[in-house]
Image (cartoon, rainbow, N blue to C red):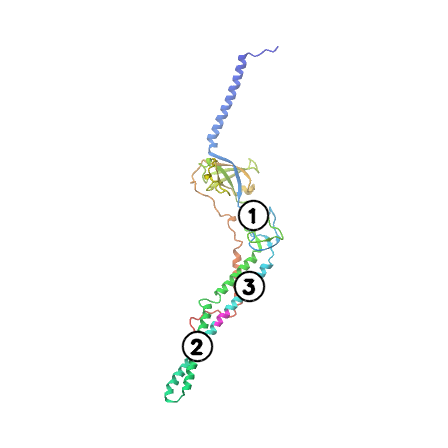
Amino acid sequence: MPMQSHPKTIRARRNRHLLLVLLLLAVGALTYAGYWWLHSRFWVVSHNAFVTGNLIPVEADATGMVTQVLVEESQFVNKGDLLVRLDAHRAQTALGQSRGELGQAVRGIGAVFSTHRQMCQKLIARSARLARVRHDVIRLRQAAPSGSVSEQSVQNAEDQMMALEAEMREAEAELKAVESKVSGTTRLLHPDVEAAKHKFIAAYLEYSRQHIHAPVSGYVSMRKVQVGSRVQPGDSLMMLVPLDHLWVEANLRETEMERIRPGQSAEITVDLYGKNQIYHGVVEGIVPGTGSVFALLPPNNAAGNFIHIVERVPVRIALRKDEILKNPIRPGLSTRTAINVKDSEQPLDTSLVSAFTQEYQTDIFTDELTQAQAEAEAIIKANMVQKEDPVEAKCGT
């Protein structure tokens, strides 16, 4: 029969094992405490953090039928590239009509200015005739007492003078009516010409917007437009996603926000690449409100039923451009974000965000207005059949 161990021996062996376990636990606790004291207490870690960026909508700015779609999802397009072409027949017809109306307005105003000159000369001629008749009346009245002229001659001259005075008043009224249309302006700056000119410019822009170009460089996503669709201004056609400017939005608990400050460094790992690929970021700013405040239906805590919930505050963390170009990521990816809170020099209300990258402005529409104005000026010049001249301040009276 095998020899059985003495109870004291068993008890001593068990105590040694328990002591070893306690020693291991103590070493582990001390190690964790040291790691926390030297490293972890300076980091705030969140798994509720996602990659985000600017999603640029491409919308129709004119009415028309889609005749061609030149891009597809996941394709990269440069700023200014043609994306969608609309049927421009109606816009081209409207442009031709407005071109004719502009020329007609220029010629019509030219006729009004000519009428003003004609009325001015007419008034001068009638003024001269009236002056001559008045002199004749004076001479006839002086000669009537001597009998050298008859009373009938004097009466006829006076009647003629009264008729000419009435014609003068009529001509003055007609001149004032014409002057109200042309006074204080020129053919080029007349309100009717300006109205027709800007109507032409609007039609030109409508025609130009039948070709839809990329406002920024980026990747095509969420393409909705199809050939044969009829689009209206404001209809969403697709989205452009620039992948060279992305950031992380980390939703931190309000209990973790005490030491968070703009300018602090951060380390981000994305599930797409795993823990071996680390992105380095900088806290750019803190959103001025919790997520619930900006929700579609914000909570009404004054309703009576209140449950305390730890709210989360979005924190924006910028990513380095060279790192995201070397290892591309996409908006919406999940991340593990760790913020180093050891340095807190910046004030809490500071923002390091800048709006100077290419998706914050576009110049693809800059030349449209200049081209439209140049074409309008050419139409006006072609229809200026008479020399430009200022309106006379006074006509002979």
Numbered disc in front, either 3 or 2: 2
Residue 33 magenta-drawn?
A: no
In the structure shown, which secondary structural element does the residue marked by tag 2 occupy? helix
> Residue 331 appears at what percent x and percent y?
55, 42
Mark toward the start of the polypeptide (3 vs 2):
3
> Mark number for residue 99?
3
Residues 295 and 225: in front is: 295
- Mark 1 neighbour class, 10 Å CA radius: few under 14, some 14 to 19, many 20 or more: many
Q: Amino acid at mark 3?
A: Arg
Cα gap from disc 3 to disc 1, whole angstroms: 36 Å
Residue under numbered circle 1: 240
Do tag 3 and tag 1 residues touch (Cβ < 8 Å)? Answer: no
Mark toward the start of the polypeptide (3 vs 1):
3
Residue at image position (50%, 62%) is 195
- Which stretch did the figure color magenta? 110-115
Tell me: residue 30, above or below residue 368. above
